[in-house]
């Protein structure tokens, strides 16, 4: 009887420990945690922060998904794809999955990141499918206001920033009647391309600009994202008078140094290549006495000019005369094409004829295009062709063609 009484508690204890052991065997070892990388002084509003979700379990996973809390005080986006690795955790080698989010605080103060949940189904050793859930610890972030950093039109936090300015052709070497393509490339480390500023304003007196589409790209690296934006303009001087393209400034916050910086591209001179003044010697115009080369050179040029005039008069029926008449016929043919394109309201064809005319008669075209009334008409035509917005009124191509034809006749 006494032995039976002693066996009862022993059996109860064995049953309890047996069930606990069975539960321990049924629940696999695992870990799920959320961490956020913070600067020592605390982040500013809008500063990009890297939040990592790290999950690992010593079992064969059937399905899993991460349930994200409502990040009401943060703007966020997933960075790249989940990374897989293997680590020695709690005495076992386990597959580890890491997900990275870029979060951006929306206001100052102490903000809370609620727990994430990892819901998964796994197979036990006997092949049974079991569902379970792991929960991460909540996180708090103390966010500072940007008022101490000064005013800025656009908040641009980055680890580093580079600005590249390219012109094709160079802005002070644009052929008469042609245009130059300006490309400004901005590369910033530590943020995604959608965080880069919009197209900078590029307006200046004496310059016509046509903005192109903005190209954005995010490059994913092990060190973090690299944002790239390409801004494009087509630039044309209004007349032969040189103009100045203003400098472009970008204020940005250096995340590593914790201070505001300014990156800029300098102002550039914009002009047609034929409008640049020719270099003159300091001694030009100084008299050197009776034996100065100026009067001798003038006499020689006068003699050559007289001889050339006599030769041309005699050569009208020769090969050189025929070439001259062919050149004039080509010029008048292009002027006739201008009139035809104008009657058809074909602005693109009109401009193509002008391009050929400027190649055939560069000197005369330079003088013709320098006239204020013609220069304004050319500018209005380019604006109608290349501008994104429709023109408020059609360009009077017929009037412009008559002015150009009359100017060519006067320039002969």
Image: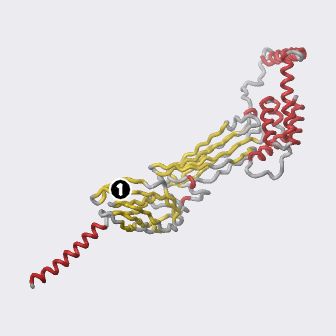
Residue indicated by mark 1? 95
Q: Secondary structure at mark 1?
A: strand
Quadrant where the C terminus is found in the figure: top right
> In this view of the protein, can residue 230 be seen by the observer?
yes
Q: Nearer the viewer, residue 293 or 204?
A: 204
Q: Is 114 rendered above or below residue 365?
A: below
Residue 54: % across, % down: 39, 59
For the image, the number of numbered tags is 1
86 left or right of 405? left
Which residue is depicted at the point 76% across and 35% down?
176
The extreme bottom residue here reads 1
Q: Nearer the viewer, residue 310 or 342?
A: 342
25 left or right of 261? left
Q: Nearer the viewer, residue 293 or 93?
A: 93
Residue 219: % across, % down: 52, 48
Residue 303: % across, % down: 85, 15
Res. 184 image quadrant:
top right
Res. 334 image quadrant:
top right
Residue 328: % across, % down: 86, 26
> In this view of the protein, can residue 306 be seen by the observer?
no
């Amino acid at each position: 009887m006494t032995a039976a009484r002693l066996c009862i508690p022993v059996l109860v204890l064995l049953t309890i420990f047996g069930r606990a052991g069975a539960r321990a065997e049924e629940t696999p070892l695992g870990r799920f945690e959320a961490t956020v990388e913070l600067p020592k002084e605390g982040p500013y509003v809008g500063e990009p922060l890297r939040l990592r979700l790290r999950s690992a379990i010593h079992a064969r996973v059937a399905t899993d998904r991460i349930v994200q809390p409502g990040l009401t005080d943060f703007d966020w986006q997933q960075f790249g794809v989940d990374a897989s690795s293997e680590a020695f955790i709690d005495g076992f080698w386990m597959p580890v999955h890491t997900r990275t989010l870029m979060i951006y605080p929306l206001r100052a103060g102490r903000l809370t990141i609620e727990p994430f949940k990892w819901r998964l189904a796994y197979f036990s050793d006997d092949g049974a499918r079991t569902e379970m859930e792991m929960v991460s610890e909540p996180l708090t972030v103390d966010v500072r206001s940007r008022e101490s950093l000064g005013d800025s039109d656009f908040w641009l936090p980055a680890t580093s920033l580079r600005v590249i300015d390219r012109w094709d052709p160079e802005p002070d070497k644009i052929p008469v009647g042609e245009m130059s393509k300006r490309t400004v490339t901005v590369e910033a480390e530590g943020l995604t391309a959608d965080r880069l500023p919009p197209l900078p304003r590029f307006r200046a007196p004496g310059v016509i600009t046509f903005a192109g589409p903005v190209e954005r790209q995010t490059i994913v690296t092990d060190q973090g994202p690299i944002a790239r934006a390409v801004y494009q303009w087509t630039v044309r001087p209004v007349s032969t008078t040189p103009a100045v393209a203003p400098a472009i400034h970008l204020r940005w916050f250096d995340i590593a140094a914790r201070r505001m910086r300014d990156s800029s591209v300098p102002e550039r001179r914009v002009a047609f290549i034929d409008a640049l003044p020719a270099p003159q010697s300091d001694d030009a115009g100084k008299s050197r006495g009776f034996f100065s080369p100026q009067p001798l050179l003038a006499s020689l040029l006068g003699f050559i000019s007289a001889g050339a005039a006599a030769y041309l008069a005699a050569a009208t029926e020769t090969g050189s005369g025929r070439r001259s008449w062919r050149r004039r016929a080509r010029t008048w043919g292009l002027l006739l094409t201008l009139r035809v394109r104008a009657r058809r309201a074909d602005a693109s064809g009109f401009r193509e004829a002008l391009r050929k005319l400027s190649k055939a008669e560069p000197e005369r075209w330079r003088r013709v295009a320098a006239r204020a009334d013609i220069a304004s008409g050319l500018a209005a035509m380019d604006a109608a062709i290349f501008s994104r917005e429709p023109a408020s009124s059609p360009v009077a191509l017929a009037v412009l063609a008559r002015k150009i034809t009359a100017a060519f006749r006067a320039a002969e």
